[in-house]
Amino acid sequence: MAFWDSLKSKTQEMNSSLKLKAGQFKNKEFAAGSMAMCALIAAADGTIDPTERQKTAGLIVANDVLSIFPPAELQEKFNFYCDKLTRDYDFGKVEAIATIGKLKSKPEQARAVIQIGIIIGGADGNFDEHERTTVRDACYAVGIAPTEFDL
């Protein structure tokens, strides 16, 4: 239980920190990277069932940081990556990770995308090993040590 309490506390801190910086993240690369991360979290176990897809879409719309983007734009990008992952998981994962990797030269935005992945992954109260592995892969793509996020 201590691990979950610690994760929940860190997630709340991350969300507050991201709210303060949200304005500087309003660009296409950040939006695409965030939606690629959300789709990867939804598909972390190798599949995306409709319920999980809908639940993740709801979390995206409710996220204060992502509210700087038009919801329809985010939905379109999220659906794009979900569809890629559904058609061919391995190829879709490569493409989604590559999109996140484009933020490597923007470390603040890269960290924010990682944090969004952790927030979305932990939103159901269970940040499982598949989700943790997915976030670790994204960390490597942007050159950030997963240990920075206790992964």
Image (cartoon, helix red, strand yellow):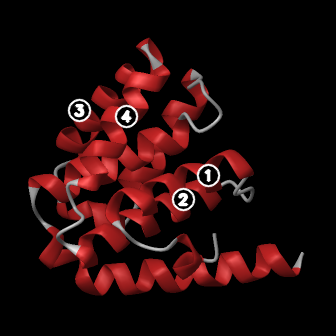
The residue where tag 3 is placed is: 76
**Is residue 20 visible to us here?**
yes
- Please give the label number shown on residue 94: 4
Q: Are marks 1 and 2 in contact (CB under 8 Å)?
A: yes
Dot 4 alpha-carbon crowd within 10 angstroms: few under 14, some 14 to 19, many 20 or more: few
Residue 44 percent across, percent down from the top left: 59, 39
In the image, what residue type sits under mark 3?
Answer: Glu
Mark-to-mark CA distance, 1 and 2: 5 Å
**Real-space Cα separation, disc 1 to disc 4, in angstroms:** 14 Å
Kind of element beneath mark 4: helix
Q: Earlier along the polypeptide chain: callout 2 or callout 4?
A: 4
- Compute the Cα span from label 3 to label 4: 19 Å
| Left or right: residue 38 compared with residue 146 | left
Q: Which residue is mark 2?
A: 136
Residue with the mark numbered 1:
133
CA gap between label 2 and label 3 equals 25 Å
